[in-house]
Every structure is written in structure tokens, then in C-alpha cells.
Amino acid sequence: MTVELKVVELVLQERVATISFNRPDALNALNEEVLEQFIQCLKVVEESEVDFLVVKGNGKVFSAGGDINMMMSPSQSERFEQVMDLINEAVLTLYSLPQMTISVLHGAAAGLGLSIALASDYIIAERHTKIAMNFIGIALIPDGGGHFLLEKRIGSHRAKQLIWEGKTLKAEEAHQFGIIDEIKEGDLAKRVEDYLSYWLKKPSRALKETKRIYVETSISQLKQVLALEKRSQFAMSQSSDHKEGVRAFLEKRAPVFNQSEKDISEN
């Protein structure tokens, strides 16, 4: 079964579902349309009989992160609310799926794109992939549960460092940190197929029960973090530093930040 929406594709084949972000010309940047269709596909998977879900991106990268156009009108609180609700629903749905989930990275996974990958159970990456939790570059904080999901993988100390620095990591570095689970050489699709063949031999009910226990004991914390991110991100989006960060990004120059805590509290 294949479901071809405008910017997201879903294929269900026997015990495996595959969701593909399909905005290759925009480096699979995640806008409202992508998020809505991603959620739609996740709900189909949730109700299906498949045991595994693969999430990937068509084109040159997995996802460059949130679409910059979503950040161009931060003063519109109603739109901000809608966008953050979509982000939170997408991450919660992916994180709590009963199926084992595998994100397959190539090219780049940045910002919200990385948060979504982190919501999966496993992350496989092609060797030349680069990742970045780079919200700091435009004076924002991670959303999509990035604080919670990164901490789960590498601990709060390292998570804070990566978030604050916003540095880009090569796949090998990310693997050493514990962010990426497997690095694959050569034909990535073939490597993923081999990886799935291993898991398809395991007792799926036992796999799902273990996942259910972990989800049920952690989902309330994820929801709390998402709520905090939503509130804080709105404050950040109103700051002069964020406006400067977006301008600098569009003008391809280094930003000059001078935002004070007083300025943030007044917004």
C-alpha cells in the first residue's frame, strides 16, 4: 500500500512501513504542510498491522529542520500556537508509536529535523551525514522535545553543551556521543534492509511490550518538556536577537547578538 501526499510519502509493505519527507527542493524543511501530512501518516501506521517504521528523507538530506518561512512572522501568536502544536503532536505521536521506529539519516539532520530523528527508537546514518542542534544560531531553543530526547541519549551535561554550542557533528562524532546508533557505508537502502531483516526475526510482541513500558513511564516528562519549550520558544521568537539571527541567516552573514534578559522579560 502506498499513500502519496504532496510533501510526505507513506509505503506499507508487509511488516514494514516507510515514511519519507518529500520536499527535496527545500531540503525537506519542515513547514505546517509537512508536519500535518507527517502526523496523518503516523496515525495510519499506528492503526496498521506493521511492526516497524522507517522514517527517511527524499533527495540530498534527511531534513534541514524547520522551514525558515515559519519564523518570518513570529509576532503572530495564533500562527505560532498552531505551529508548535503541530510540532508537539508529531513528536508525541512518533515517540509513542507501538511499532519500533528507525530514522535513516543522510546528508544532514538539523534543528527540528534532528529532534524528530531523536524521537525514533534507532538512528542509522550514512557515514557522511552531519547533524546539528543549531537553534542557537537564530537565538532560539530546541523544540520538538529536543531537550528531553537529547538528554535521554547522552545525559543533560552533554546535551546542554551541544545545544549551547550549536555545533555541527559528523556522523562518527555523533556516534561516539551516542546520538547515532549505527553508521552504514555504501548503499544505505540495502544496509537498512539488512538491518530490518535482523529485527524481523525477533519476537515483535516482546519488542513492543518493552517499548510500551518505556513510553508509559516517560511520556509525562516529554509532555512537560514540550509545554516548556512552547512557552519559552514564544518568548525567544519575540526577541531582537531572534530577529537579528533570521536576518543574518537570510543575508548569509554572522549575527550580532545583544539581547538582554530584561529585553526578553519585557516581550
Image (cartoon, grey):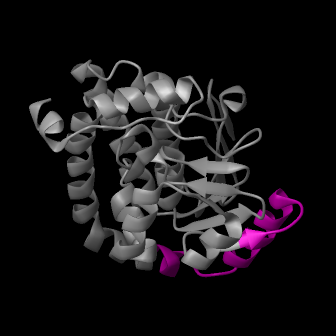
Magenta residues (range): 183-208
Which of the pair 211/83 is nearer the observer?
83
Q: Is residue 263 magenta?
A: no
Residue 224, position as x, y percentages in the image: 20, 57
Which of the pair 16/78 is nearer the observer?
78
* Image-based side of 198 in relation to 97, left or right: right
Q: Residue at x 41, y 20 (%)?
A: 72
Residue 149, position as x, y percentages in the image: 40, 63
* Image-based side of 222 in relation to 168, left or right: left
Residue 164, position as x, y percentages in the image: 40, 58
Residue 73 visible in image: yes
Q: Residue at x 64, y 71 (%)?
A: 173
Q: Is residue 202 magenta?
A: yes
Quadrant placement of the C terminus: top left
Quadrant placement of the N terminus: top right
Residue 35, position as x, y percentages in the image: 47, 34
